[in-house]
């Protein structure tokens, strides 16, 4: 059997079953970051993301933006746990024929993004490869009481997203701003019950929250903020690479947030009891079930 | 200009020049691991290593050993800093056509190696790739006073290696045991002035110690322990992938170690004043200068 048959999430499940961890580990695999005990009031976050030429970018993309993205996807994972990025390592697989000038421009993108968020780059590893591969591993820090995971959504919670969704392949996947500031604002002002970054697509990532929280959801077509690059609702639901935050708040915190009329956050629906799955209410009030499918690599 | 023109160490230097770090960083790039402040008496170690199909292994190798190696090279970096590995993430770039059975066997190798050293695997990332890529990022811990770097070699220090060198491409590069126990024994019994793991080859890695320590060395052909797989001295000097420890001790600690007649450690020479470079004394007592060259990817 080939791995394309079992699919990305099948592979991840297969992998996870073998994992055993000790008491230093608060959260192993299965969230945006792994969470490790650090000090009396802080946890350490640990995440990695691999970008591959021809899959996550092409050599026709602006090189600075390729470097930026390599860091930004990991920063987005740290933001989804409501933490601050601190340190990172960068493994590069480089084709011999890569022009030095191109590599310099990618590197400039990496360092500029690191500088923006005061992330310490601590070196990494170089290897030869047929296609360019950039793997970033990143550490972060989060106050214990500020940590947000996927598994805390509760029936009656309201569901929010930052920014707008869909069509990211037409540019935003390279230029998005990881939602660190938004995450910080949220945990400083509300009790965020669950959060994830939308990398696989709204339907898939909402599915991840629901599976982890043992819950279901209803979302409203009218309320989903479509990106100007999105051709249709489907792209917002299933395309992925938006790197926006998807999170849930209790009814009372949701009301507080909505009263602020802060355009960075949009309410798109509500968490319901598990038996209902994901229901989408369209513009005409008709209801349909949504499969939690999205972008997968295989 | 292509990156093959500037070479691996040229690239690393280019990269390092852009790096700025804050006060949380004890050692950034340029040693076997990055070193981060952790607690009153401990530092955290952070390292990553990327293995690429066709460069670091082939799909004809035993899959369990490929998985093993992916972890072992990072464990070896932690050992070179005299630390203990604690947590790791694994990024996999997978060809769609990879047989699931093969991936399962690689995974088994990864988990068995992690289990052996009680390393917590915390998940990672999956991507599609044309060739199999495995990037492991690993955290470790070391007592502050036990940390050993490349830069502490002193004139008069004796130079030692663990195990035997050369010919690793014929098998040992897949099956070597990272020298964690040996490193622990050393720091518990001696003041280890400098240490590195031999990944690029004895000449190149001794060169790294000398450059960092602003020193030179004389080594003796007669004293270099050749692996049974090594065809000649050159393979021990320049081939790389031995993953043995290379370290230096003061004269009095060297005498203490030699008196133990512990066959795991072999004295191969001595640190000298900087002006001498690396000199090799051959079996006939003739001296020649050794270039610190070794395996490079480009």
Image: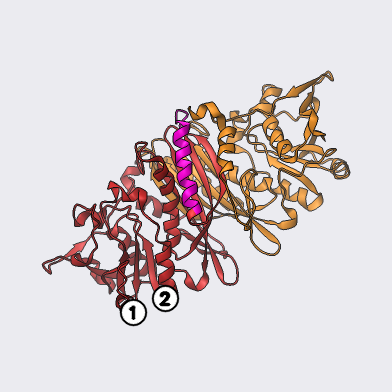
Chain colours: A red, B orange
Q: Which residues are magenta?
A: A95-115
Mark 1 crowd level (few <14, some 14–19, many ≥20, 10 Å Cα): some
- What is the secondary structure assignment of the residue under circle 2? helix
| Residue A109 lies in quadrant | top left
- In depth, the one of B250 and B19 nearer the eye is B19
Q: Is residue A117 visible?
A: yes
Q: State which tag comes first along the sequence, 2 or 1.
A: 2
Please tell me which residue is depicted at 28% across the width and 74% down the height of the picture: A273
SS for callout 1: helix
Report which residue position mark 2 lands on. Answer: A189
Q: CA distance from mark 2 to mark 1?
A: 9 Å
Asked if the residue at tag 1 contacts the one at tag 2, i.e. Cβ–Cβ closer than 8 Å, the answer is yes
Determine the main secondary structure of the stretch shown in magenta: helix
Where residue B147 appears, as percent x and y from the top left, is 72, 52
What residue is pinned by disc 1? A256
Is residue B153 in the magenta section? no
Q: Position of residue B120 (x, y in %)?
A: 55, 56
Q: Position of residue A253 (x, y in %)?
A: 35, 78
Q: Is residue A260 left or right of residue B138?
A: left
Q: Position of residue B38 (x, y in %)?
A: 64, 61
Q: Residue furthest bottom?
A: A252
Image height check: is B10 above or below A111?
Answer: above
Viewer-closest of A49 and A13? A49
Does A155 sit left or right of B120 as displayed?
left
């Amino acid at each position: 059997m080939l791995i394309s048959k079992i699919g990305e999430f099948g592979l991840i499940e297969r992998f996870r079953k073998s994992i055993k961890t000790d008491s230093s580990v608060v959260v192993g695999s299965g969230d945006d970051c792994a969470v490790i005990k650090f000090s009396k009031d802080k946890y350490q976050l640990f995440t990695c993301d691999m970008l591959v030429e021809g899959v996550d970018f092409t050599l026709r993309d602006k090189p600075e933006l390729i470097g930026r993205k390599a860091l930004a996807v990991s920063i987005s994972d740290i933001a989804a746990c409501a933490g601050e990025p601190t340190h990172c390592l960068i493994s590069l697989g480089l084709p011999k024929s890569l022009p030095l000038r191109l590599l310099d421009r990618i590197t400039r993108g990496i360092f500029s993004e690191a500088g923006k968020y005061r992330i310490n780059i601590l070196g990494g590893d170089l290897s030869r490869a047929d296609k360019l591969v950039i793997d970033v591993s990143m550490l972060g820090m989060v106050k214990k009481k500020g940590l947000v995971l996927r598994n805390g959504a509760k029936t009656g919670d309201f569901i929010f997203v930052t920014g707008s969704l869909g069509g990211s392949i037409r540019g935003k996947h390279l230029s998005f701003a990881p939602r660190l500031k938004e995450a910080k604002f949220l945990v400083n002002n509300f009790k965020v019950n669950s959060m994830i970054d939308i990398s696989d697509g709204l339907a898939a990532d909402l599915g991840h929250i629901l599976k982890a929280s043992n819950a279901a959801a209803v979302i409203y077509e009218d309320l989903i903020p479509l990106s100007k690059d999105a051709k249709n609702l489907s792209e917002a639901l299933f395309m992925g690479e938006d790197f926006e935050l998807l999170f849930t708040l209790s009814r009372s915190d949701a009301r507080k947030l909505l009263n602020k009329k802060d355009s960075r956050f949009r309410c798109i629906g509500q968490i319901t009891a598990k038996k209902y799955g994901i229901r989408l209410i369209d513009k005409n009030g008709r209801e349909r079930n949504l499969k939690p499918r999205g972008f997968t690599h295989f």
